[in-house]
Amino acid sequence: MGSQSSKNDVAWESLFAERDILGDVDRNGMHLITAEAINKRREARLMTKFDHIVNLPEIFARNGLSILPNSRTSYVIGRFDCYQRLSAQQEPEITEWAFPDWIQSLSPDDLYSESSALLCAQHSGLLADVLDDENIALTVFGRMSTGTFDFSIQENGRDQGAEITPRILTVDRAQCEIDGAFESANSFAILEVKNEEVNDFHIRQLYYPYRLWRNKMSKPVVPVFLTYSNEVFSFSVYDFVRPDDYNSLELVKRKRYQIAPTEIEISDIRRLLTQTKIVPEATDIPFPQADRFERVIDLLGRLYAANGSLEQEEITTNYDFDRRQTQYYTNAGRYLGLIERKEEGGAGVSYTLTSPGRQIMNKTPKARNLALTEIILSHSVFRKAVEYYLTHAAAPPIDAILDAMRDAALPINDTTGARRAQSVLGWVRWLMYLTASG
């Protein structure tokens, strides 16, 4: 383990050594461990919640392992195929949508929690449109027991293409949580919601509630995964085509919507170019290596919702970031002057929004995007990249960005610069996309 290993990494390495977990998995296909045993190293709820593949502890990732709860007090570790990657197919067009003007207690301009995003999706009629049913009602949410059921789950093969026999597991009254379930005369939809852009999700979050309610309902149970990021609602509607098969999840349809206006004009960018002054490059903060500016905004939103600070390990463990990405994206926020890094004694590293960061995130989405654009244009490398785009109606070549970096006297060689240039391109694409020109 490296010096940057997380608390979860350290605790799991110790448990693996003490209990010979790898040996047990190799011999028996799985290892059963109780919450009590995990708690001796670190609180089980912090040691077992890995919503995304990148959240897995190092020893799990190295050995193709995952962990599943199989009761309220125990877990099973094995080479289980637990995650579903979001479709890599071309994204559907975004549908513009209206929000009821009589609702004052919920604003589509201020959706920094998963519950508020879900309520907005319901009251605006997005869910009714996705489910093709005008009359839906929120009937279930929160934590509950799964009941008892058996299911098959695929195992990760050690060799690509190896024929692997699915393993049969039993769940006996484990705990599951539903962000929201909506019933109509024709169906019962279970939603898992993330307030960020993600690459994958843990199938358990849909499958355990699906199995619980399938046994209770006479109507179809519809699993739905919803992300809300950068004011875009993205719905993935699924079906477990073989209800007893954890891995039989198939995408039925995908739809995207936007309520809060975010679009800016080319004239806005040209105006900001004439008004914005270039600031000196920071000497103590790395030049950004964070290719998706949408994820920078997601992180700013998380910090805004926290109304305080988030520990570095908390960001890595709870969101779709690995340790390196956490550093890249927090440093990107620091580069813009919107995030502050704190390190106090043994408390570890934490991050909070600066005063300008909080002011910007308190704006409407369109005003926020204009403010972020102004900050981006205050940095010479990004400014030149945007100017190139406006002149040539195309993204600048890497060599042009490297020239801008040299002009700015950045301490970056060509190899490192090429990687940083990808971030410049990513941020410029985000900006031009806002004008519907990207």
Image (cartoon, grey):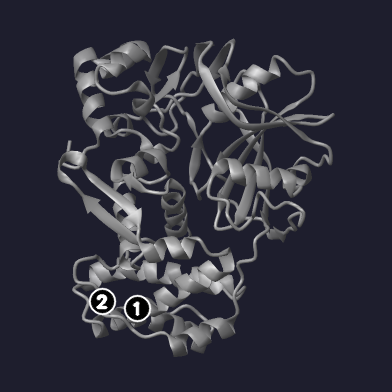
Amino acid type, mark 2: Glu
In x, y percent, where is residue 72? 46, 13
In x, y percent, where is residue 138? 72, 32
Q: Is residue 436 left or right of residue 62?
A: right
Q: Could you tell me which secondary element the residue under label 2 belongs to?
A: loop
Amino acid type, mark 1: His
Depth check: 97 or 78 in front?
97
Depth check: 128 or 395 in front?
128
Q: Quadrant of the C terminus?
A: bottom right
> Residue at image x 35%, y 34%?
56
- Which residue is denoted by mark 2 in the rendering? 281
- Which residue is denoted by mark 1 in the rendering? 379
Label disc, if present, on residue 414 of the rendered structure = none
**Residue 223, can we see it?**
yes
Q: Is residue 95 left or right of residue 24?
A: right
Q: Is residue 124 left or right of residue 173?
A: right
Number of numbered labels in the structure image: 2
Give how far apart the Cα atoms at labels 1 and 2 are. 7 Å
> Residue at image x 18%, y 47%?
344
In x, y percent, where is residue 69? 45, 18
Vertical placement of residue 213 versus 396, above or below: above
Circles 1 and 2: CB atoms closer than 8 Å: yes
Depth check: 136 or 398 in front?
136
